[in-house]
Image: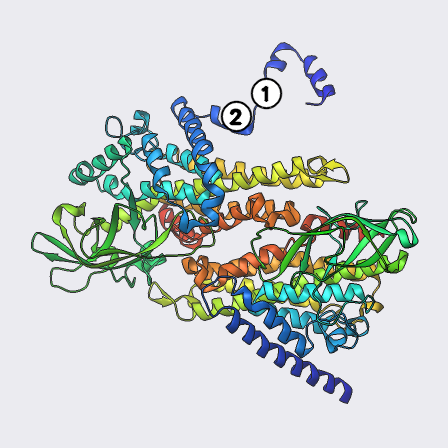
Amino acid sequence: MHPHLAASIERLGPMGRWLYDRGEESLWERDTRTLPRYLQRRRRKYRRFARQHVVPLAVEADRAPEQYDPRPLLAEAGRWGLQSEFLPWPVGRMPYRALWSSKIFAAVLKAEELCAACGGIGLSLLAHDLGIAPLLLSGHPPSILRWQVAINLANLRGDVQLAAFAITEPGAGSDVEESEGAGRARVVTTARRAPGGYVLNGQKVFISGGGHCDYVTVFAVLEREDGSRGQVDTDFTCFIVERGRPGFRVGRRERKLGQRACDASQLFFDDVFLPTRNRVGAERSGWALNRNVLNYSRAPVAGIALGIARGAVEAATNFARQTRLNNRPLVEYQEVQLALAGMWMDVMAMRGLLWQSVRHVKPVQGIAAAAKARCGDLGFRVANRAMELMGDHGYLAAHGAEKGMRDVRLNQIYEGTNHINALALIESLWEPEFRP
Amino acid sequence: MIGERARQEEWRAVESTLRRFAGRVERTLFAGEEPDGDLACVPSLLAELRELGVLADPSPDHPGHELGVWGRHCREEGAGLSLLALSTLGEACGGFAAAVHAQGLACLALDGEGDFPSGAALAAVFTPHYGLPFGPEGSGLRLEGQGDGLRLRGESHFLLAAGPPAGLVCFARAADGPEGEWAAVAVEGDAQGVELAPAGRRTGLRAAHQYHLRCEQVPLQHVLQRGAAAHHALQRVVACDWLGQAAIALGVARRAARDARAYAAQRYQGGRIIEEHASVRLLLGTAEYDAGLLADVLQRHAGVGLDSLEPAALLRWAAEARLAVGEHARRAVTGCLQVLGGYGYMEDYGMEKRLRDVSVLKSLHGAPDRLRLLLDGLARGEDT
């Protein structure tokens, strides 16, 4: 604080001095203290985990993802309770407060902290939450008790049990995420009834964590009663497939621009027999289940973008503090301060939008979609601005800014492209806001 | 009229040759699965380009010296042919085009002087650790001593080259001249006191080489230029550097648009081909607008000899073209990547490489805000 301003504040009356903020804490601390205490504790825990366990691995995991084994880190995350946060004690580590308030605020905080350290490693941890989401959201007690509780307890013991979520197909990406296309989606993964269960055939692509998961929640079109082919919006059904099931295999791992520490794998299902108990929820409930998984997952995905953007801003800020131009630190130049301020404001806007979006007890489709899309766009803008501020250093791997750009670019694509999310907002709010 | 027609026919012939060669670059480099191409093929492709006379050459006896990218012809005929070559090669591979561009810049700086043999890979040296070379720190290099005791000292960064440079054309501030007097000198890449270190892994343009230079009392036999002549030469090299980057980015953006359009013509969503979807049409239309704008900026003085342009006008043109890379070429490429959805993000489809390449081009040898400040300075008549 400028000494003249400090002196002037002292000349205010007592109430005036009390009403004047003179704190010098970081923005992170200030934001944390606005949260309920149970979320404050979570946020600090996630940051501790990220600093201790994610930061040391980030550079190499991005440089050589095919050599990175995520399971040790995921086991540690399991022991910390990070893989079991959607059910409460004793079968999970969801805070009890979340039972009657936001279910995913903690997930959003987790996403930001993990991905500020590394977007790819963060995604590999969060992909598990996405994988088990259909179990809880099905509202089907056998699915929850038989599968989700068992997975949670195993992870809490440090016995890694990971799930992945499989919906995207080679010919159907956006189509399985929005209403208009769903009826005409060209899906190839089908299920037909068989004695004692179902037989699954098909293929999924770009499945985060698919390469090392122990379980995958798969959406398939269930054949109709008359034997005809079903369609996504009327016949989608969710199943859980264990690794090792005959006929289930993992195909190639895609080579991505960013978030490289997390695999995006092909999965193949060749006459995979699944007992009835492997069906998640009711037959043909999959379309609603899938859409609601997206409602719950889009905010954490926005949290990924926020974390990556924050990491880029921190890298640019550190660069500006340490680098000198004409014997002055860059951060003392007004044009640099203006650029940094713009980035910091974007990150604050992202956090404001995101935290507001998850204050609803149940995620609202349009609001979740808006947060996901806008945070993706702003994150990409921030990461690019960070690279530009750093000049030639920005595109060198050594400084971390270019990785942020590569990582956050995916946030404009997965979990529904931003155009799909924009249309999800329109669909969700059509009646109250847009109907002519 | 006849002369103009003959000139247009000559340009069409040149463009046709370049397009065929660019196709060859693409087929050779990307025959395998490496996202940035089989970089071991680059030297042989550069050698072929040199045979064609498109790669600039330090020897006045070689056709590339006159006709190559940033060859002697630019001084009287303008940058048009060089920009055409770089944008055409950029459609095939931004990194390969950057290697060709780097060789041309160094030969432009050399201007026929020096004793480098034909075929030698050269690098122009003019970028400091941060900022533009027009500030008090200059390029980071200083010339010290006099006569036989002339020495080069200091550090310069991010020099681009087609290969390990056999020679360096350095712009340095003369410590023994008037305050800020510039000098251009040539040194062997392996001269005593010269340390070249790879700049490190970067996000794009990987077919080109990049180094940091450290000079510790490097003895000099030959000063190419001093004073105003060296200053003008530096301004010319910096401007052509930015113009060349913009041309490469234009090529990258055009190719991205072409590929995105082809993809959109055969991908279905919601029962319709996606080229009919409003969201895709908006993305592709914006990419067309962005590429068109960048092309128009590059055309502005393309037919005016570099020697006929005032340094301030040349720098202004170049800075605006380079800024358009960040604002327009990058937006075009990222929009085209978005059209491909998840496939655009994967290495197999070539689009992510284009985003990486253009992400380097928007900041290479000049952060955008530095260029904006330069433009304001030029408008106010400040010396650069």
Residues at discs 1 and 2 in contact (Cβ within 8 Å):
yes
Q: Identify the residue at the far bottom of this view.
A: B2
Disc 1 chain ID: A
Badge 1 element = loop
Q: Amino acid at mark 1?
A: Gly
The residue lying at 79 percent from left, 45 percent from top is B137
Badge 2 element = helix
Horizontal and vertical percent for residue B181?
88, 51
- For label 2, the residue is A30
Horizontal and vertical percent for residue A169?
31, 59
Q: Picture quarter containing residue A157?
A: top left
Horizontal and vertical percent for residue B305?
80, 71
Q: Amino acid at mark 2?
A: Arg
Q: Of marks 1 and 2, which one's residue comes earlier in the chain?
A: 1
The residue lying at 24 percent from left, 32 percent from top is A153
Q: Nearer the viewer, residue A31 or A218?
A: A218
Q: Nearer the viewer, residue B155 or B196?
A: B196
Q: Picture quarter containing residue B224?
A: bottom right
Disc 2 chain ID: A
Q: Is residue A425 left or right of residue A243?
A: right
Q: Is residue A169 above or below residue B79?
A: above
